Image (spheres, rainbow, N blue to C red):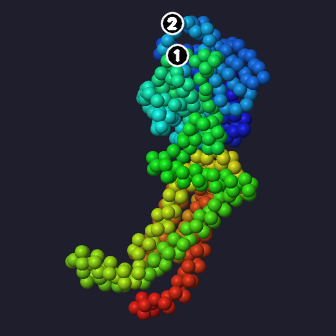
Amino acid sequence: TELILNEYSDEERGKAHILIENEKHLYPFAVKADGEIIDDPLPMEQTEDEEAHYFTFDYPYHDFNKVIRIPRTGYVLESYFTDVNAEEDDIELLLSTGLLEDIAEENNMRHRAQGGGLALIGNRLHQERTMDENDYETYTENIQWGGVQSKYFMIVGRNNNYFDQFHLRGMRLNGDAQPTAFVTFSELPSSSDPIQVFGGPKDYRLLQQFGWDMERVIFHSRLGAWFRWLCVGLHQATYHLTRVVGNYGVSILILTLLVKIILFPLTYSSMKSMSKMQLLQPKIQELKEKYSKDQKKQQQEMMKLWKKYNVNPMGGCLPLFFQMPILIALFRVFNESIMFRGAGFMLWINDLSQPDTITQLGFSLPFIGDNLNVLPIFNGTTMFLQQRMTMKDPKQKAMVYIMPIFITVIMYNMPSGLLLYWSISTVLSIGQQFIINKKMKHQNKDLPKDLKKK
């Protein structure tokens, strides 16, 4: 017995299970009674009507039947109990899922790292990414909904005012300990008021339509609401650009260009400030030597120097200050948005949510693995060229070589969508640097005589 999201399943990515039978249990909707998960009896009765399929399970050693209703369209499943004996109590429903069952091992680990249990308690979203076996979290008040998630999918049960308790517990399923979700009822759901369970993709626009506040799961961050809305804005911009141009990769190129245009005034101001700072270096060095034993006086004189030549020592950091949140937000967007899952660009880049591997090396390298990925190498090369253009201090010459290598290693297995953005951004930055350098040479003649390059 299984229920698969066909739109999100294929041979390469595996099957996206919503309902799966495993070791005599049917996940989700496995029943726990008297502290033990009880076997789902087979055969089961299956009926259908114009709107849905119905699966009925008869539990001979317990006085109730369980019914699962699967609609012909949509992502909301329902479950309820029939023929319930009044003495039956301590019944729990397990909201666990087989989403990770058939996903390739490499992707499996990525999905697990971004999976776990989740619950909306009052207005606060709680997430448990990892839980050791027998770890336990229980919520008893203001339960809105709760369930489990993987990287791209989620199973969430909605509280229709009969959740007595919601539990997140570490259990060993599929060989590994992972968070699972249990619901304890104040009264068992009936056919007139069943438990509603969303089982589907973590698609921002889709989740918005349900009115359960489930879209809050997308891009949830401890950095605060401002960062989440930055992620949502970039996500929506990419989505609407793609509706126009028809290719997510092309949308990333356009988005990169737009970001560069918006930040150009800051970039120009920064590079202008850095150019003046380089011209001031001899004077700064003189002050350091002159007031080497009086740090307070040294700082005062430097402030006078910067004021005299209208230089902001922090001006060079402004573009980085604004670009870093955008870069981090884009990482979240490319890494978590299901719209990039399986979305290709051109040539060998056939999935913007995965590294752009073109072949296997036949051997494994530390921190890199055995894949040959093109974009991180290209990104490291362009970063090296950019460093050579901007690094003027001989004492920092080693950084011209160290930083590109470090970034290449760190970014080697990142999503190709993110690396596409960063690579194109670096290429545009080199172009900007070349143009601004030429402009700075023309403006040197307007500088005070004691600052002009000899």
Residue situated in front as seen by the camera: 7 or 239: 239
Q: Position of residue 400 (x, y in %)?
A: 48, 70
Residue situated in front as seen by the camera: 323 or 422: 323
Point 58% across, 50% down: residue:
232
| Front: mark 1 or 2 | 1
Q: Secondary structure at mark 2?
A: loop
Which amino acid does the dot numbered 1 rest on?
Glu
Q: Quadrant of residue 98?
A: top right
Q: Position of residue 170 (x, y in %)?
A: 47, 29
The answer to whether any part of residue 176 appears in the image is: no
Residue situated in front as seen by the camera: 313 or 100: 313
Q: Is residue 66 above or below residue 361?
A: above
Residue annotated with mark 1 = 187
Mark 1 near mark 2, Cβ–Cβ under 8 Å?
no
Point 48% across, 21% down: residue:
164
Task: Please give the label number shown on residue 87.
Answer: 2
Q: Residues within 10 Å of mark 2 (few under 14, many from 20)?
A: few
Q: Position of residue 302 (x, y in %)?
A: 32, 79
Q: Quadrant of the C terminus?
A: bottom left
